[in-house]
Amino acid sequence: MVIVMNKLESDQIISSKDINQVVVGSLNPVKLNSVKDALRLIYPSLSLLVKGVNVESGISAMPMTDDEIRKGSSQRAINAHHLTGEKLTVGLEGGLSKLGQTWYLTSWTTVFFDSFISQASSLRMPVPHEVSEKIIHMKLELGEVIDLLVGEDNVKQERGAIGVFTSGLISRTDLFRSSIICAFAPLITPKFFDLENQK
C-alpha cells in the first residue's frame, strides 16, 4: 500500500509501511534539521523519525572539488546504512568547488534507499577571495575562517558561511534542504525515473 503523501503526487515509493525512520550520516544539528525540514515538505503525512549517527566521510576535512564533496556525501549515506541496517539513509557534505577563477560554496546530498542511490547538489554561492585564500594557503577549514571573520564560535553549526554572506537571507539549513529535496526526486516522482517497479 502506498500512502498519498502530498497534494500533487500519489505514486511515491516510500510509505509508512516501508519506513518509519531515516538515518543521517552525521551528528551535526544543521544537517539533521535540514533533513527534518525537507522530509516535512516531501512527506507531510508521514511521521518519520530522523536519527543521526557518527560515520566517516572518507574525504578531507575541507573538500575542494565537486567530486570530493559528492564522494563524501555518498560515503556518509552508505556508511550510515552499513552501521544501522536502516533502509533509508541520507549523507550530506559541504565544501568548495572552483569554476573558472572563482571558488563557490556548495553541498551534495546522497539518498540511499534499499540499495538505490540518488545524488543532487545545492545552489552555489561565490566565496570572497580573502576567505578562499586563507583556506588554500593557511590550510584552514571554511568554518574556522568564518569563525575568525565574524568573531564567533562554531558558525557552521548555526547559520553557516552562506548565512553570514547573505546576511541571513539563506541559511546553511536552506542550502542543504534544496539538495535533499532534489536528491529525493526519483522517490517523489518515480514514474519519471523508471522506478515504478520499486513501488
Image (cartoon, rainbow, N blue to C red):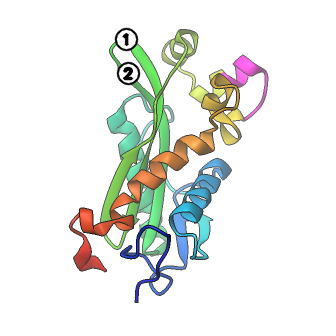
**Amino acid, disc 1:** Gln
Q: Nearer the viewer, residue 199 or 85?
A: 199
User: What residue appears at the point 63 percent right and 50 percent down from the top-left corner?
Assistant: 28
Q: Position of residue 100 (x, y in %)?
A: 33, 14
Quadrant of the image containing the N terminus: bottom left
Q: Nearer the viewer, residue 44 or 96?
A: 44
Viewed as shown, does residue 37 lie left or right of 4? right
Q: Quadrant of residue 81?
A: bottom left
> Residue beneath label 2, please?
98
Dot 2 crowding, Cα within 10 Å, few <14, some 14–19, many 20+: some
Q: Position of residue 92 (x, y in %)?
A: 49, 49
Tell me if I can see residue 53 in this picture: no
Quadrant of the image containing the C terminus: bottom left
User: What residue appears at the point 61 percent right and 61 percent down from the top-left corner?
Assistant: 36
The reply to whether callout 1 and callout 2 are in contact (CB within 8 Å) is: yes
The answer for how far apart the CA atoms under marks 1 and 2 are is 7 Å
- Inspect the magenta stretch and tell me whether residue 166 lies in it: no
Q: Say above or below: 161 vs 45.
A: above
Q: Secondary structure at mark 2?
A: strand
The segment highlighted magenta reads 146-154
Q: Secondary structure at mark 1?
A: loop
Dot 1 crowding, Cα within 10 Å, few <14, some 14–19, many 20+: few
Q: Residue 101: which disc?
A: 1
Q: Position of residue 102 (x, y in %)?
A: 41, 15
Q: Position of residue 101 (x, y in %)?
A: 37, 11
Q: Residue 72: which disc?
A: none
Q: Give the residue at the far bottom of this rendering.
A: 1
- Inspect the magenta stretch and tell me whether residue 153 lies in it: yes
**Amino acid, disc 2:** Lys
Tell me if I can see residue 136 in this picture: yes
